[in-house]
Image (cartoon, rainbow, N blue to C red):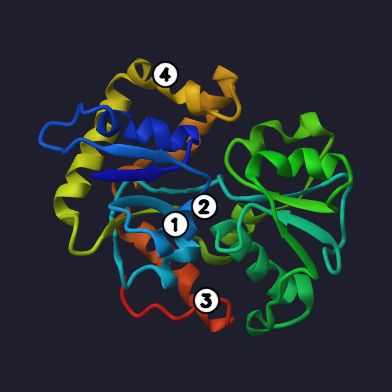
């Protein structure tokens, strides 16, 4: 069976046991690592058994894949940041680097830009910035710092290191989302291919992998560091602590409510196709 995840510490920590044949009863996994923008695209064009994607990409994928209730990335205080070299009053007409055009981060940015308090318009009138460029995640902060972009949308461990690049946070989209909805931020989802993977069994494998990771974090440390784009141990530890949480083990009512709220608001704004059933 194939497993496609990002090289980010939350994914490698969560899936270490499953990827290394340490989950009893689970099949051997052929693992592929790719940035989330790549996995969002691959899931459309390739038969992937288990895959990590953005929640924002679900409207284009649920005909072929089923959402699993575990293994993904949701939480509080962990949302995407919009960064610039100096404070900005608006991003209208600016060059903005984003990690993918179907990422949750970009969808949140578009919702924020279209909100009444930021754009003077209703969410249904939300629009993308005038000039958007999809950039590999690792290139966004250096690109903004060098002036190639006016602003950059970043995720994950970037929130711990962006001051090193001389950048400032224009908006924490997670804080905005939580203050607007009261719900956690739905970032990354785990999907199972319909007709090829038993979703109940897959969920149990993933939960077992998470439990093993929590029980002895030292077992996965070398594996996590080998794939981390930010190699410092303290940054990796902060990343895992923030993004691998109770929602990783089970979405629960709050997690599902957050996903429904994101996709409903985005569909109402005309940004994604409507989703009738998760």
SS for tag 1?
A: helix
SS for tag 2?
A: helix
Quarter of the picture holding the N terminus: top left
Whether residue 184 is visible to the viewer of this picture, yes or no, is no
Q: Earlier in the sequence, mark 4 or mark 3?
A: 4
On residue 42, which mark appears?
Answer: 1
- The x, y position of residue 175, in whole percent, is 62, 53
**Which of 205 and 268 lies nearest the eye of the viewer?**
205
In percent of the image, x 42 and y 38: which residue is there?
A: 11
Q: Nearer the viewer, mark 1 or mark 3?
A: 1
- The x, y position of residue 110, in whole percent, is 66, 68
* Figure label count: 4
In percent of the image, x 60 and y 35: which residue is there?
A: 157
Mark 3, Cα crowd under 10 Å, few <14 / some 14-19 / many 20+, is some
Residue at mark 2 to residue at mark 3: CA–CA distance: 19 Å
Residue at mark 2 to residue at mark 4: CA–CA distance: 25 Å
Q: Nearer the viewer, mark 1 or mark 4?
A: 1
**Which of 275 and 33 lies nearest the eye of the viewer?**
33
Tell me the residue that label 4 is attached to: 221
In percent of the image, x 72 and y 77: which residue is there?
A: 116
Mark 2, Cα crowd under 10 Å, few <14 / some 14-19 / many 20+, is some
Q: Earlier in the sequence, mark 2 or mark 4?
A: 2
Tell me the residue that label 3 is attached to: 272
Mark 4, Cα crowd under 10 Å, few <14 / some 14-19 / many 20+, is some
SS for tag 4?
A: helix
Mark 2 touching mark 1, by CB under 8 A?
A: yes
Tell me the residue that label 2 is attached to: 38
Whether residue 128 is visible to the viewer of this picture, yes or no, is yes
Mark 2 touching mark 4, by CB under 8 A?
A: no
Q: Earlier in the sequence, mark 2 or mark 3?
A: 2
């Amino acid at each position: 069976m194939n497993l496609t995840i990002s090289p980010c510490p939350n994914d490698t920590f969560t899936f270490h046991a499953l990827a290394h044949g340490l989950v009893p009863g689970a099949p051997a996994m052929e693992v592929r690592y790719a940035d989330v923008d790549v996995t969002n695209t691959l899931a459309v064009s390739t038969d992937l058994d288990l895959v990590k994607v953005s929640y924002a990409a679900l409207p284009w994928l649920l005909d072929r894949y089923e959402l699993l209730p575990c293994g993904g990335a949701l939480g509080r205080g962990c949302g995407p940041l919009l960064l610039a070299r100096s404070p900005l009053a608006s991003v209208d007409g600016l060059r903005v680097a984003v990690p993918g055009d179907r990422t949750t981060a970009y969808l949140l940015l578009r919702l924020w830009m279209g909100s009444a308090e930021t754009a003077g318009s209703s969410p249904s009138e939300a629009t993308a910035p005038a000039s958007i460029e999809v950039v590999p995640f690792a290139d966004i902060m250096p690109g903004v710092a060098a002036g190639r972009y006016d602003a950059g949308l970043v995720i994950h461990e970037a929130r711990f290191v962006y001051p090193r690049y001389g950048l400032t946070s224009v908006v924490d989209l997670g804080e905005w989302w939580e203050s607007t909805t009261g719900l956690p931020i739905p970032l990354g989802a785990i999907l199972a291919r319909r007709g090829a993977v038993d979703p109940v069994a897959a969920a149990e494998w993933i939960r077992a992998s998470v439990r093993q990771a929590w029980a002895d974090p030292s077992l996965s440390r070398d594996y996590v560091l080998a794939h981390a784009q930010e190699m410092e141990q303290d940054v990796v530890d902060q990343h895992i602590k923030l993004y691998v949480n109770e929602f990783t083990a089970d979405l629960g009512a709050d997690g599902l409510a957050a996903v429904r709220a994101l996709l409903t608001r985005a569909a109402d704004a005309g940004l994604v196709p409507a989703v009738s059933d998760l």
